[in-house]
Image: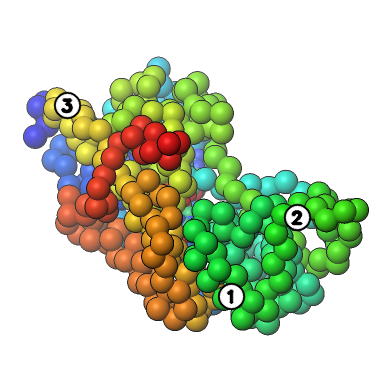
Amino acid sequence: MNTTDHVTRIVVVGGGYAGTMAANRLAGQEGCDVVLLNARPQFVERIRLHQWVAETGEAAHDLDALLGDGVRLVVGVATLIDTGRRHVVLESGDELPYDRLVYAVGSTSKSGFEHAFTVGDWESAQRLREHLATERGPVTVVGGGLTGVETAAELAEQGLPVRLVCNGPLVPSFGDRGRRATARALDTLGVRVFENRRVAAVGPGSITVVGSGADEEWPSATTVLATGFDIPRLAADSGLTTDPDGRLVTDESLTSVDDPRIVGAGDAVAPSNTPLRMSCQAAIPLGLHAADTVIAAINGAPAQPIRIGFSGQNASIGRRAGVIQMCRTDDMPRSMVISGRLGAFVKEQVCRFVLRGIGIEARRPGRMRGMSRKPRTAAELAQAVAS
Ligand SMILES: Cc1cc2nc3c(=O)[nH]c(=O)nc-3n(C[C@H](O)[C@H](O)[C@H](O)COP(=O)(O)OP(=O)(O)OC[C@H]3O[C@@H](n4cnc5c(N)ncnc54)[C@H](O)[C@@H]3O)c2cc1C
């Protein structure tokens, strides 16, 4: 229970997986005024952006419809968190006062070359989709991680000639069986995979590839970079401690190391300075935990450390196949792999459950749980990965 008659003003910055979960949970807390600030009125289901680009699925949903009754949506972009005055300053010049703030600004596409496209956020996916509406020439996807594989497969299934260039092995985070299953499924769709090659330059209709002897120039009507995600600079610009990539550094309860009124969740935080794999699989339990930490602070209770663990890595390979690489809680691959149509089915159910879970927390705050068989703190996870 709130120990004072005072209404606690909570601003959640960022309406992605972590932020919507946090806002919905907080709305169930008596005596709280919860505002969710998001850059747009839609919830962007980033895990379906490759489908949006290939026109095989929707990725934007009315955000208001996913929020609990007690959450007020404000559409705008935060440019500064003024921790002294406890105000969030918006691009529009408006300000939102807060007593507690949840920082959940997520991540965006990593860009690099002027003539390359990206797929990791709404605006860049939209640009790529518009480009592909008229351009059916050879496509190069750069980056052999999960986003690169999913994007290459989705476009190839729509009849585009696609090559995938990886600067190391294909899906390095998978085990051997998962990697072989992925290679077979990509081959079935006609995707040509080039491992251990680096794209050094991207022109309007070609790329320069380094890796097997002399540099080679290959035709590429569309080049898509899937080489990782960038982190927004809001925390750093606001004078908060961040890791070298710009993630807000927190303790194990997800509280900022600078300011007890600020709690973080999702791709944009580094608990104990050791970020988890950027994923909705981590963002959702982190969002729920961030809300629990805020609620504990309001009630004068001790904040609990996060207990989190991974279960698997999923890649859709077009609409008819998928590879589910089962993992240990520290995200290291196990021998078990689910592939083919069953893999596609499991992946689709995971995607649906994510949206459904946000709705469940909206209707019944406190209902959703983190999803781990043998949870650990972030520091324990990092230690397990390092050993
Ligand atoms: C193609 C693709 C496939 C993926 N597949 C998977 C998968 O299968 N499994 C998985 O676990 N993960 C997957 N991911 C990764 C996953 O989407 C991200 O890790 C996840 O979205 C992170 O959630 P988040 O809540 O931290 O941030 P986000 O979902 O990025 O949400 C952040 C929100 O904050 C808003 N925002 C940012 N800055 C501001 C600001 N200054 N003011 C106001 N609003 C702001 C943004 O507009 C956005 O709405 C995939 C990603 C991509 C691109």
The percent position of residue 21, horizontal first and vertical second, equals 30, 50
The percent position of residue 13, horizontal first and vertical second, equals 41, 40
Q: Residue at x 56, y 28 (%)?
A: 244
Note whether 58 is above or below 244 in the view shown.
below
> Crowding at label 2, few (<14), some or many (≥20) Cα neighbours within 10 Å?
some
Q: Which of the two residues, 123 or 91, is positioned nearer the viewer here?
A: 123
Q: Quadrant of residue 267?
A: top left
* Left/right of residue 309 with respect to residue 14 in the rendered view: left
* Left/right of residue 273 with respect to residue 231 in the rendered view: left
Q: Kindly report which numbered mark, 3 or 2, lies closer to the viewer in this rendering.
A: 2
Q: Residue at x 18, y 32 (%)?
A: 296
Residue type for callout 2: Arg
Q: Which of the two residues, 1 or 311, is positioned nearer the viewer here?
A: 311
Residue matched to label 2: 197
* Left/right of residue 159 with respect to residue 31 in the rendered view: right
Residue matched to label 3: 302
Say the numbered circle drawn on residue 184. 1
Circle 3 SS class: loop
Marks 1 and 3, the one that precedes in the sequence: 1
How far, Cα to Cα, is label 1 from label 2? 20 Å
Question: Do the residues under discs 1 and 3 have CB atoms within 8 angstroms?
Answer: no
Q: Residue at x 8, y 34 (%)?
A: 1
* Left/right of residue 252 with respect to residue 110 in the rendered view: left
Extreme-top residue of the structure: 84
Q: Is residue 359 visible?
A: yes
Residue type for callout 3: Pro
> Crowding at label 3, few (<14), some or many (≥20) Cα neighbours within 10 Å?
few
> Crowding at label 1, few (<14), some or many (≥20) Cα neighbours within 10 Å?
some
Q: Residue at x 52, y 45 (%)?
A: 107
Note whether 224 is above or below 308 in the view shown.
below
The percent position of residue 254, horizontal first and vertical second, equals 33, 32
